Amino acid sequence: MAASAGGLVRTVAWVVERPGPMASGPLRRVERTVSEPGPWELLVEVAACGVCRTDLHLAEGDLAPHTPRCTPGHEVVGRVLHRGHEVRDFSPGDRVGAAWLAGTCGVCRYCRAGRENLCPDSRYTGWDIHGGYARYAVVDARFAYRLPEGPPDEELAPLLCAGIIGYRALERAELPAGGRLGIYGFGASAHLTAQLALGRGATVHVLTRAEEARRLALELGAASARGAYEAPPEPLDAAILFAPVGDLVPVALSALDRGGTLAVAGIHLSDIPVLDYQRHLFQERTLRSVTANTREDGRAYLAEAALHHPTVRVRRYSMDRADRALADLAADRVTGVAVLLTD
């Protein structure tokens, strides 16, 4: 839709109307106004938006809403239409990406220490501000990423959360050079993280319940692919839990070698059973969480991805089928990553 004389844009967008199970229809398509970008903002015409499990957690109410009737989506690829008067790094027509981290205070002790992902006043795309399940979105240029011209929109979109969060999870897992990595769950982020680890020379073992996901893992170069609750064929130096299943925490800890680290990558996790100190944590095994990402994580991952060119297994949906895409994700009918396309 065209901008009005006052600089406003009308857009069709999905909103979380009433959080609940996907069968209850928590998403609703509405028409709303997108305001003119502020001094540090960009008005972006969305070409594609990845569908993340975090979007599902928000739609179903696992995560409490921060903004009523918020538009989900934080793996946004598009073109700059207009820019605020303070923006110097982007111009109209530039290809740009918006990710999960949408803003921080910039002055707290976490921001000053380079740990902006822990900023108490951090804001998130599709949770605090409207995201990419729409034709247009307004994003803070200071938290946007310049994207290369070559790859298709649907292959770039998943890199902006699934890829970046997987990168941070791999860093938090402290996998040694040439080490043995276990990946529990094999969806959007996991299939990109596996390729990142393989590119660094790791041996990767995948533990996931879906047979099709296990086949994909082997196609991408995993040394083994077994059921989620099975033991890997060798002790692990590190593991990452992508599945939001707390029952898998003791399973993954038990699979670690001495001194190994388990990083839990999700923003939401079901309850963790009682851990046995001797079996699960003794011999200096470490359990760590992963919280959002920094902009430096995003820049570092996108640079590494440009070198290794990960294979992105995409299932495409038109933007008007966002509710179907989330329902398919909830029912484990998506192998790889679902992406919404506006055209």
Image: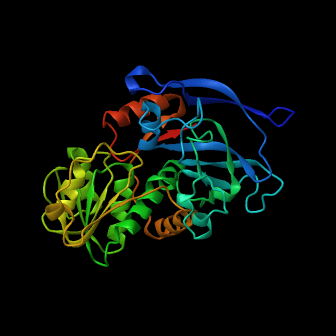
111 relative to 133, above or below: below
Q: At which x and y percent is residue 280?
A: 18, 61
* Residue 208 seen: no
330 relative to 255, above or below: above
Image quadrant holding the N terminus, namely top right
Q: At which x and y percent is residue 207?
A: 21, 54
Depth check: give the residue in front, 73 or 59: 59
* Left or right side of 154 for 232: left
Depth check: give the residue in front, 277 or 78: 277
Question: Which residue: 18% across, 61% down?
Answer: 277
Which colour assignment does the render follow? rainbow
Residue furthest out toward the top:
24
Question: Which residue: 16% across, 68% down?
Answer: 235
Image quadrant holding the C terminus, namely top right
Depth check: give the residue in front, 143 or 301: 143
* Residue 14 seen: yes
329 relative to 244, above or below: above
Residue furthest out toward the bottom:
177
Q: At which x and y percent is residue 157?
A: 51, 50
* Left or right side of 40 for 302: left
Question: Which residue: 53% across, 33% down?
Answer: 319
Tell me where residue 168 sits by quadrant. bottom left
Q: At which x and y percent is residue 190?
A: 34, 55
Question: Could you tell me how many numbered marks the image carries?
Answer: 0
